[in-house]
Image: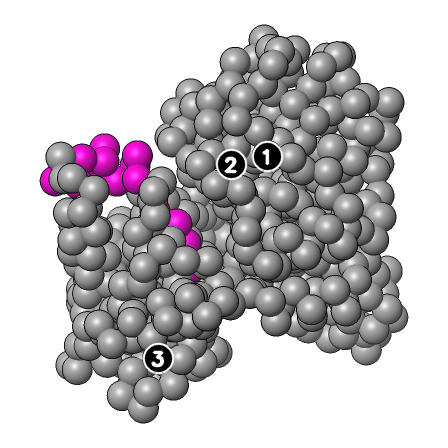
Amino acid sequence: MKLSDLLSYDSIVIQGHDNPDADAIAAGFGIYSYLRSKGKEPRFIYSGDFKITKSNLRYLISTLDIPIEYVEGLDTVPDLLITEDCMYGEGNVRKFEAKTVAVIDHHRLSGALPELSDVRQGMGSCSTIVWDLLRAEGFVPDEALSTALYYGLYTDTGELAEVSHPLDRDMLDALEFDASLIRRLRHMNISLGEAKIAGIAMLGVEYHEAHRYALLESEPCDPNILGLISDFYLAVDSVDVCVVFSVLKDGIKFSVRSCVPEVCANELAAEISKGIGTGGGHVDKAGGFLSAKLISSFSERYAQADSSSKKYVVTTLIRERLHHSLCDTEIIRSGSYTADPTKMKKYVKLPVKQGCAFPAEFLPCGTPILVRSLEGDTNIEVAEDTVIMIGVRGEVYASRQSVFDKNYCLLDEPYDMNLEYFPTIKNSVTGETIPLAPYAKTCRSNGGNIILSAPLERPTKVFTKWNKDEYFKGEPGDFLSCKEADPADVYIIAKDIFAETYKEIQEVT
């Protein structure tokens, strides 16, 4: 869906979810601003049992002159109703009749979508999706809208701690917002009542001494309060990992913190939410949301529980997933671990096509750059022999010309891989963002490299020989691998990539 697809309708209503947060307000403001620029006269509304009362949101609306209005009903049926930051017909948004419905959202899909829809579950905020839709139309947000969009992402990702998708980071780089207003809003987030909620939550901590993690439940509150509680509790000298959650009307919001390299908060958030919500963030700070509807389909106990009992079912579910992630995972450190060749098979690398780029062709040598991909950001310095490799799934890693010449050959054909997010380069000196697609070339591995591999039988984290501070995570079915000549140099290859790039060597008997 494109925003220009909405211009054929006359009467248009934009609706955020009941009790809207900063993200719903910002996303709706973005859609409203675009439609107004095209001569439309949309209404921007919200409904529910309560009007907006939080001081930071009221200040945001009044300072930026955001035309959001509270309604209990609509006098006429609009030609088009756009629900943003929510799904039409869900429990967290009052249902109004409309001739046509459109949906823009970043929460996990839990039902059928109308033809006009843009739902991207991996985004940190609905504001990010609206920004990307605006960008596609060539619409540049002014300072007021930029500030709103920034604050929408800021609040929906625990003060940016849970930002994980590269498009979220692209928006942060592009927006020219009012930094002084953001600072003011940051210090208007907590009321006296919310401070009391934080205190009560910390009194009810569930601590697991053997694995040094804490689990806390909070009363319903602003998501930032969960981050405040988890940050505070992680300062306790005997706590390495902390998870704080709150049971809301439409699901469960949770915050994750970690201060040890063996546990990446973003991966833990993804594991807690797997199949029932969304989760992500940074290695030390992350969070997510569990959908009540998805939990009901996953857990019969939850579906049948009354409202007061649901939190006990949720606590058990989060506890089990947390315990499984922290206690049932094998940790391997290259150097202190040597693979057993007798339990592994030999595989040879296939001649597979992938992508590559040579940054010295379009940037001066010595330029520090940030390479952005779905897997995250990688900082490197451009050298004359730097090669940026683009894997079969869009994963990016840096190499050298000598290594490239030994293992790959360039092909005389355009690079046209269909990737969810094409990697970009940011010049760390000038701040310029450079799309990598125009410079990407097609190459093919020569094949012939022999490795030893065995499928994992349990979740495993490997600290490799070349990176002792960050681990690679493997699930059962992925492959623990090493060079035939060096069983101590172990690493993990995802099963789908392994199947495409390696072939077993059949031993002759």
First in sequence: mark 1 or mark 3? 1
For badge 1, the amino acid type reads Tyr
Q: Which residue is mark 1?
A: 70
Question: In the picture provided, is 34 more to the left or to the right than 85?
Answer: right
Camera-nearest label, 2 or 1: 1
What percent of the width, then of the height, locates residue 224?
48, 63
Which residue does the image show at 61% across and 71% down from the upper left?
A: 187
Which residue does the image show at 48% across and 41% down from the upper left?
A: 50
Which residue does the image show at 78% across and 35% down from the upper left?
A: 33
- Most frequent secondary structure within the magenta stretch: helix
120 versus 238 height, above or below: above
Q: Which mark is residue 233?
A: 3
Disc 1 to disc 3, C-alpha distance: 38 Å
Q: Which mark is residue 339?
A: none
For badge 2, the amino acid type reads His
Residue 483 appears in the rendering: no
Between 78 and 112, which is closer to the camera in this rendering? 78
Q: Are marks 2 and 1 in contact (CB under 8 Å)?
A: no
First in sequence: mark 2 or mark 3? 2
Which residue does the image show at 43% across and 81% down from the upper left?
A: 468
Does dot 3 land on a helix, a strand or a loop?
helix
What percent of the width, then of the height, locates residue 134?
76, 37
First in sequence: mark 2 or mark 1? 2
Q: Which residue is mark 2?
A: 17
Camera-nearest label, 2 or 3: 2
Residue 185 appears in the rendering: yes
Tell me where the magenta segment starts and ends, as one range: 287-303
Disc 2 to disc 1, C-alpha distance: 11 Å
Q: Is residue 298 magenta?
A: yes
What percent of the width, then of the height, locates residue 327?
19, 70
What percent of the width, then of the height, locates residue 301?
12, 40
